[in-house]
Amino acid sequence: MSYTTEVADYVAGARFAALPDSAVRAAQRVTLDLLGVLVAASRSRPGVAMNAYVRGIGAQPRASVLGTGIRTATSYAALANGTMAAELELDDVHEKGTHPSSVYVPALLAVAEDVDAGGRDWVTALVTAYDVGCRLSWAMGMREVYGRGFHPTAICGSFGAVAGVASLLRLDAPGVVNAFGLTGNQAAGLLTWETQAEHFTKSFQTGMAARNAVTAGELAACGYIGPPDTFDGRYNVFDAFSTSRDFDELTQTLGSRHEIEHTGFKFYTCCRAIHAALDILFDLVAEHRFTAADVADIRVRLTAGIAPLVDGNPLTTHNLQYILAVALVDGEVTQAQTAPDRRADPALGELAGRITLVHDPSLGTARKIVGPTQMTVRLRDGRIFEDGRDDPRGGTAHPATDQEIERKFRRLARQALAAERAEQIIAEVRRLPELPSLRGVVALATDHS
């Protein structure tokens, strides 16, 4: 048996009855969290542009684009929803490094609506997606994938998503192998988004990964044959996108440890690598009552594996110096703080110039890119404050509560939906395993105006 067929057997055999309550609850949290992100992002510039493209295609109406009145083919709905999912930088971050929900949920939503899947089928498919995609990213080596110039969320996310799609379509093991093979022939995602001020390219990558997963799964369901042994054959994803290959990480504890339980949630509109620094900064401000005008300089230390991604980056959400500066001035980091016109403020540029990011090779581990964060704040009156965090709020060390996720959902959903409808979605997700169909939730999250 190859590793490809071992994983395919797991996907084909996944059943709701085998899932622990903890995995089911985690699936409910992920679902509500990403639904809020999708609805709010339908008003964003990338979202509006992508939705105009999808609306113009005029494909057979089989699945919905959330936050809009658009119904289209499943693959195009996955493309549009997947694009919106990453736009606000509020999708989840798994402890193994990828942003799973921004690819998995959009792909699965399109198929679940099309086949009229129930809540238990949805939960099973979502858990399966996390189990495959997150393990694959760890087995490939996060540093190695980034080092080759690829984005693991786009590459590995497509495989996790197709595992969930295959579960919803009830593919047998050979069918899953075909779906993996067809996915491998579409996998892509260059780190070129780091050079762009807005999220157009980064968001497009998650949209394409979701679309490709739906395409591969549906083709496999139609009997289309893909190449075998995509994970361990002569030409495989490890050799194509990485320099590492750890098959134990791919298959060990498969079916007993569910990766969806080890994902973290975001409460700031920026890269997760900046979140712990924001937690520290806001706590120091609350305790010592200083303002931006009081700050002489700030020094932040991050692991050398992640620091380059957020050090003066053109992409606003990935620019640590700017994000900390605007956080000091505005007291929050939302879509408003990462908008192009806000970043153009010269006063924020001057403040950002007093913030230094140190690429510290002594932090973190060889495998984990995002490690501890350390900060030193020096005030003009001579006072110095120091603090450090191993994990930000919402991460696995400081997990988000159901109440926090519901508050985040309300804040986001009400940007596009009536408050009453937002509350109905919360109520439906609370009883997600008992829902006979996901179509009701999807209908509540669309714009009928």
Image: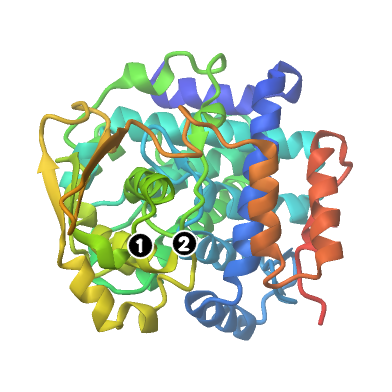
372 in relation to 446, above or below: above
Q: Nearer the viewer, mark 2 or mark 1?
A: 1
Figure quadrant of the N terminus: top left
Determine the secondary structure under disc 1.
Answer: helix
Measured as percent of width and height from the top left, residue 23 is found at: 65, 25
Look at label 1 and name its amino acid: Leu
The quarter of the displayed image where residue 429 is located: top right
Residue 149 appearing in the image? no
Q: Circle 1: is it few (<14), some (14-19), or many (20+) Cα within 10 Å?
A: many
In the picture provided, is 271 more to the left or to the right than 177?
left
Q: Which residue is mark 2?
A: 332
Look at label 2 and name its amino acid: Glu
Asked if the residues shown at circle 2 and circle 1 are in contact, with their CB atoms under 8 angstroms apart, the answer is no
The quarter of the displayed image where residue 194 is located: bottom left
Measured as percent of width and height from the top left, residue 117 is found at: 79, 44
In the picture provided, is 295 more to the left or to the right than 5?
left
285 in relation to 139, above or below: below
Q: Circle 2: is it few (<14), some (14-19), or many (20+) Cα within 10 Å?
A: some
Q: Spatial distance from mark 2 to mark 1, Cα to Cα?
A: 8 Å
Residue 325 appearing in the image? yes
- Tell me the number on the disc at residue 207: none
**Residue sitting farthest toward the front:** 381
Picture residue at 55% right of the left edge, 56% below the top: 215
Q: Which residue is mark 1?
A: 328
Figure quadrant of the C terminus: bottom right
- In the image, 34 versus 130, the foreground residue is 34
